[in-house]
Amino acid sequence: MKTFKILCPTDFSECSLNALEYAAKLGEKYKAELILFHVPSMEDYRKLFRQPKEESLEFVKKKMDNLIAEVVLESVDKGLISCTAAVKEGKTVETIIQFANENDIDLIVMGTEGVNDIKTNFIGTKSSKVIEDSSKDVLIVPRKVFFKSPRKFVYATDYLEEDKLAIQKVVELANFYDSEIDIVHVGTKNKIIDRALHQTMVGEIKPFIRYEKISYVLKTYRDEPGLGLENYLITAKGDILVTLSKKKSWFDQLFTQNLSKKMSYFINKPLLVIKEV
């Protein structure tokens, strides 16, 4: 059986350390190998060191060693198989994706600054580019969100054929924590499906899902689907938002639109984007 592999890019910022906590906790459940990954930024290092190359690489090594020691102490006896480090120079996004492909990574866990990154992109430029360009599943963890066992996963769906496989991944995660799963379709004034059609769609998916704590929800909002989903996350007390990213999927429709800056769920909820089904 293949060992699950998690890649956690880090720049040693607060938000990337938050992501590392999530990566380690998930690694315990998956019995995974965890790889801390750093792409040196000489531009950033020049601000910190007089002799950027030599001092920065020594700094990175010490930082990585300290983080590995903490993760090993906290997580290895709880199920995590190993924690190692890798450093590779290059353009950040491309280097992360290349490393993930070359090392058969199953899940990339990244931090995002949330509200500070919203100026041009809701979930941070680097994070969103990794989601867009990578073929690997990506978990985005906001800076202010600390790990807690998820009580409820909210899976946003347009009822695509691939959802049947993607939801299996959510079920596996939910089983780890005995969590609830809400499978939610958000309709809008421009795209409304009636309850009969919704029941037909649910009927097609149900035979593929073997999990008791699951609900199928149809919601219609007058606003953009993203705002409707945010409203649902708040009222249903969802802990992690999950969606499938495929052509014509809900995710791609939502994220390619210029949505209102009122959307805040990326600031306070982790986002799991499933790319491989």
Image (spheres, grey):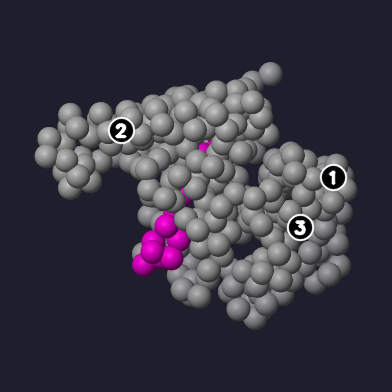
Q: Do the residues labelled 3 and 1 touch (CB within 8 Å)?
A: no
Q: Quadrant of the N terminus?
A: top right
Query: What is the three-letter code of the residue carrying label 1?
Result: Tyr
Which residue sits at x=66%, y=57%? Answer: 239
Of callouts 3 and 1, the N-terminal one: 3
User: Which span of residues is magenta-colored?
Assistant: 106-119
Q: Which mark is residue 60?
A: 2
Q: Is residue 63 left or right of residue 277?
A: left
Of callouts 3 and 2, the N-terminal one: 2
Residue 38 lies in what quarter of the image?
A: top left
Which residue sits at x=58%, y=68%? Answer: 226
Which residue sits at x=49%, y=33%? Answer: 70
Residue 112 lies in magenta, yes or no? yes
151 and 246: which is toward the camera: 151
Q: How crowded is mark 1: few (under 14 residues within 10 Å), some or many (20 or more)?
A: some
- Name the spot of residue 68 as percent of width and height, x first: 46, 29
Query: What is the three-letter code of the residue carrying label 3?
Result: Asp
132 and 15: which is toward the camera: 15
Q: Name the residue under label 3.
A: 182
Q: Is residue 248 left or right of residue 99?
A: right
Q: Mark 1 points at which residue?
A: 211
- Give how far apart the Cα atoms at labels 3 and 2 are: 41 Å
Q: Quadrant of the C terminus?
A: top right
Q: Residues within 10 Å of mark 3 (few under 14, many from 20)?
A: many
